[in-house]
Amino acid sequence: MQLIDPQHPAYRPLWVRILIVAVCFGWALVEIITGDPFWAVLSGGAGVYAVYMLFWTYKPQSEETATPPSTDDDDDKEDKKDVD
């Protein structure tokens, strides 16, 4: 089961991927400091999984393949609007 889809456009900016990983590990640190090792292990595990999915298996798509090409039908509809 895949919890994070690394090909989703929301993960394209590097700062988003870094922020997700930093929040997971930061929360694990907070849980360690407050003395709750169970939640620290869960947060750390989420951080490890996020690193794996967002950095190890991440393959960026180019802008050309990420956006679908426009069809000729859309252009024809715009031309007809201009004529009317």
Image (tube, rainbow, N blue to C red):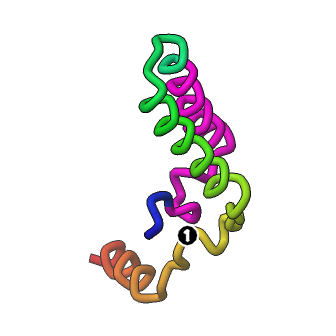
Quadrant of the image occupied by residue 74: bottom left
The secondary structure that dominates the magenta segment is helix
Q: Decide which of 36, 22 is in the foreground and name it.
A: 36
Q: Position of 5 compared to 16: left or right? A: left
Residue 6 shown in magenta: yes
Q: Local crowd at mark 1 within 10 Å, few (<14), some, or many (≥20)?
A: few
Q: Residue at left 43%, top 21%?
A: 36
Q: Decide which of 83, 67 is in the foreground and name it.
A: 67
Q: Is residue 73 above or below residue 31?
A: below
Q: Residue at left 65%, top 37%?
A: 18
Amino acid type, residue under disc 1 in the picture: Thr
Q: How far across and down, in percent of the image, does residue 58 sit? A: 68, 61
Q: Residue at left 62%, top 46%?
A: 48
**Residue assigned mark 1:** 67
* Image quadrant where one finds the C terminus: bottom left
What span is colored magenta in the figure? 5-29
Q: Decide which of 37, 60 is in the foreground and name it.
A: 37
Q: Position of 76 compared to 18: left or right? A: left
Q: Count the marks.
A: 1
Q: How far across and down, in percent of the image, does residue 73 sit? A: 40, 88
Q: Is residue 7 above or below residue 13?
A: below
Q: Residue at left 47%, top 15%?
A: 35
Q: Is residue 63 above or below residue 49?
A: below
- Label 1: state its secondary structure: loop
Q: Decide which of 28, 78 is in the foreground and name it.
A: 28
Q: Is residue 62 above or below residue 51?
A: below
Residue 84 shown in magenta: no
